[in-house]
Image: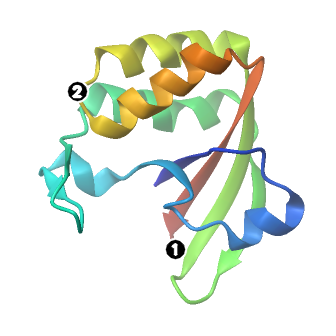
Amino acid sequence: AVTFPYSVPTEESLEMLRPNQGVSFHAGDLAEDRKSARGIGRGRLEEALWGHLVQIPLRASPRYVGFHLGNRMDRYHLAIEMNEIVPLLSRLQESRYRPSREMADYLLYHRPQSIELIYTCQR
């Protein structure tokens, strides 16, 4: 999963951050349309957008945050600058996946110089 927190995470909140505390992209959404508890569909995550999201840490150096024992997942934190935000924003705007639109709206409204991404993966 890749999570874009709504606020800049602190050291303490990075360890406690749950995937639903921001805009989250999940590999499971590549295969099917998912419905939330309220019956609202997230849509289907496009492979091009997911591929772009997983390529970002290869160009940068994410920082290992820790291991969540309950979920058996490793967590990584990455701050990306404007030169990575612009291509990401164009991919988000092309997408029909609901979390993509939320993140694109946030980026267009706030125009941040850098953003934080949290990568979560199973061991």
Mark carried by residue 96: 2
Residue 91 placed where, x, y %?
39, 17
Residue 12 placed where, x, y %?
85, 68
Residue 48 placed where, x, y %?
30, 25
Camera-nearest label, 1 or 2: 2
State the scheme by which the image is colored: rainbow
Answer above or below: position of 105 versus 79.
above
Tell whether 57 sits left or right of 32: right
- Circle 2: residue type: Arg
Residue 7 placed where, x, y %?
72, 45
Mark carried by residue 123: 1
Count of marks overlaid on the render: 2
Q: Are marks 1 and 2 in contact (CB under 8 Å)?
A: no
Tell whether 112 sits left or right of 96: right
Residue displayed at 28% across by 23% down: 95
Tell whether 89 sits left or right of 116: left
